[in-house]
Amino acid sequence: MTTYITTPIYYVNAQPHLGHAYTTIVADTYSRFRRISGEDVRFQTGTDEHGDKIAEAADKEDVAPKEYADRISGMFRDTWPILQVEPDNFIRTTDADHIAVVQEILQNVYDKGDIYFDEYSGLYCRGCERFLTEKELVDGNCPDHQQPPQEIAEQNYFFRMSKYQQQLINHIKANPEFITPERYRNEVLSFLSEPLEDLCISRPKTRLTWGIELPFDENFVTYVWFDALINYLTGLGYPDGEKYDKFWPVAEHVIAKDILKPHAIYWPTMLLSMEVPLYKKLHVHGYWNVDNTKMSKSIGNVVRPKELVEAYGIDTLRYFTLREMSFGLDASFSSEAIVSRKNSDLANDLGNLYSRSLAMLQKYCNGVVPAPQQEGGNDKQLAEIAEKMLAAYTKNMETFQFHRGLKAVWELVSYANKYIVTNEPWALAKDEGQRPRLETVLYNLAECLRLLALVLKPVMPETADKMVAGLGIAADDASVNLLAVGGAWNVLNPGTVLQKADPLFPRVDVKQHMGKDEKKSDTSKKEKKKANKSVPADAEGLITFEQFQQVEIRVAEVVAAEKIKKSDRLLKLTVKAPEERTIVAGIAEHYAPEEVVGLQVLIVANLKPAKLMGIPSQGMVLAAKTEVDGETRLVLATVSKPVAVGSTVA
Ligand code: MSP
């Protein structure tokens, strides 16, 4: 089986930002997922270097377009290794072989009669690099660039796009997976329900010279989209070659919604005219905003991937973007949101599972993976949840539902953490008669980590490699590289010798999370200083009394609650404890606002305030995680009898 996955080729008029990073991380993750599925994969990205935009940007800096393109294209190329993105091919539309093939295709389509010369006047948006229809305008402006288009009248060459309209409609209708998610398929079909205009595919040299010259008229250059889309073929050596034969039939493109029309309408009609089979799938995602605001240079909120990697680490960035965005919908980036995911999902859930399990394997088994001997407790459930996770993970990764795939993986992480608590290996270790049980529990934990390393490899390659190294498994072992071998339970070989394990994610610094309220705590300064050295929890995960005392738990009464726009996870709570404060709680999927008003809940009162979706949250509501019909549920922690608001819990 083979996979060919592509990203858009990015314009070289601006440096890479979070949006480019996301699409490319998606394609990289998918390509790695297909590799662990045993497929022969080709992953292509690159840069789009011709057209008005680039000529204009180069002009502003007073350099030749090619020199400018070389510089920015280099920035894209240099960004990918920082993001652990490993394409098999990086294409540039200024590559000589690409140019030659674009000209050959133009000539063929022209000879066939699908390109004609005509006079045209229309509304041209420089930002989109295309003519817009009246219907597309919002208040007279281009909806994407918030600028009025220019009225342009000139003679140009046109591609008979309309000729292929019905064929395209038939194809989309017959192939429900051609464009996904469905909302974008519907959008395209709705657009196609009106007569399609032909596509202007040339620019007179009097207006633009930075482009590929038309082979049949030296006074014109090719429209940048006619040139750019063809990269998906030229990158395979089209029209000849083994790579083309092997990969084109399985081509899948990933794009964001901004370039749906060129990919879902121009490109397939061009392929129909060229008599080349249509690509297989188009995966369309939404837009990243920043703090709920459109990312834009003029607002000054453009987020650069390099800076994100420096601040949070690459695997946190990869995990966060894939987990936070529901593929197809818009999402909002904020430093609070990424820190919160890092602390809870990565440091607490996964990081603790890993370090506690390995520490216990070191302590009780001398760092050698024991053999399972005596099944008991909730071993069966753990294995079942692992299997369920594998099925959900595979299905969701195949269909670009990365957030769902990761959610399924975290059900296993959280069950495994629970497994430690319910089996109490430290108690088993005290009784020699329980040795077979202890070794079984620890084997299961090591096996869980192996399986997690395998499924997380596409998403967080560095973390997965660390886990594999800590487990003492060879980096190239099939059990951590291939789902067909490792996608099962009881695969890890007993006797495997663990290696020195570095923590996966830096431990959450207790001090950093204690706010100004710290002063209020009655722990003496001396005691606090001692505890703040952040004595790590020991192998059993035990903390000292002083460490516990640092957390101020209080009873708070919820006086108001409301949903937070654009978040299906968060509720904004107003509580009295006894002073009034706002707490943003991740319980919206489990509680309606009206259900929580009036409840007396337990809160951590001395958490450093943090902004969530732009709302300052002063504390944390405590809730129990439980399983109902295989789904994780959150149940708020309350008191058994009403008490005075603000009462401390100790
Ligand atoms: N050069 C064309 C594509 C030609 S493909 C044959 C182009 N380039 S671009 O540099 O503008 O990149 C657009 C793509 O960048 C989007 O489709 C998406 O993949 C990514 N993103 C740019 N901004 C984005 C967000 N704010 N959010 C998510 N992705 C975004 O269009």
Image (cartoon, rainbow, N blue to C red):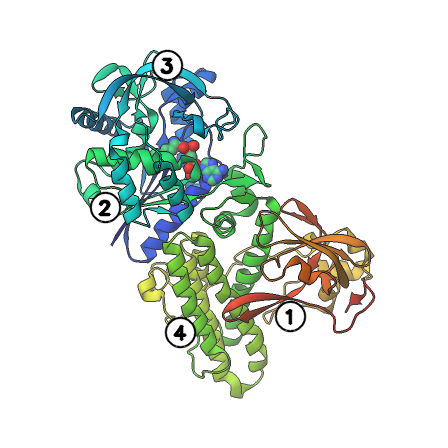
Amino acid, disc 1: Leu
Q: Which mark is residue 542?
A: 1
* Inter-mark Cα distance, 2 to 4: 45 Å
Q: Secondary structure at mark 1?
A: loop
Residue 129 located left or right of residue 500: left
Residue 495 is marked as 4
Indicate which quadrant contains ligand 1. Answer: top left
Q: Is residue 213 left or right of residue 390?
A: left
Q: CA distance from mark 2 to mark 1?
A: 56 Å
x then y, percent, for residue 128: 42, 27
Q: Quadrant of the C terminus?
A: bottom right
The front one of 528 and 403 is 403
In space, the residues marked 1 and 3 are separated at their CA atoms by: 76 Å
**Closest to the observer: 102 or 515?**
102
Assign a secondary structure to mark 4.
loop
**Toward which corner of the image does residue 241 lie, by quadrant?**
top left
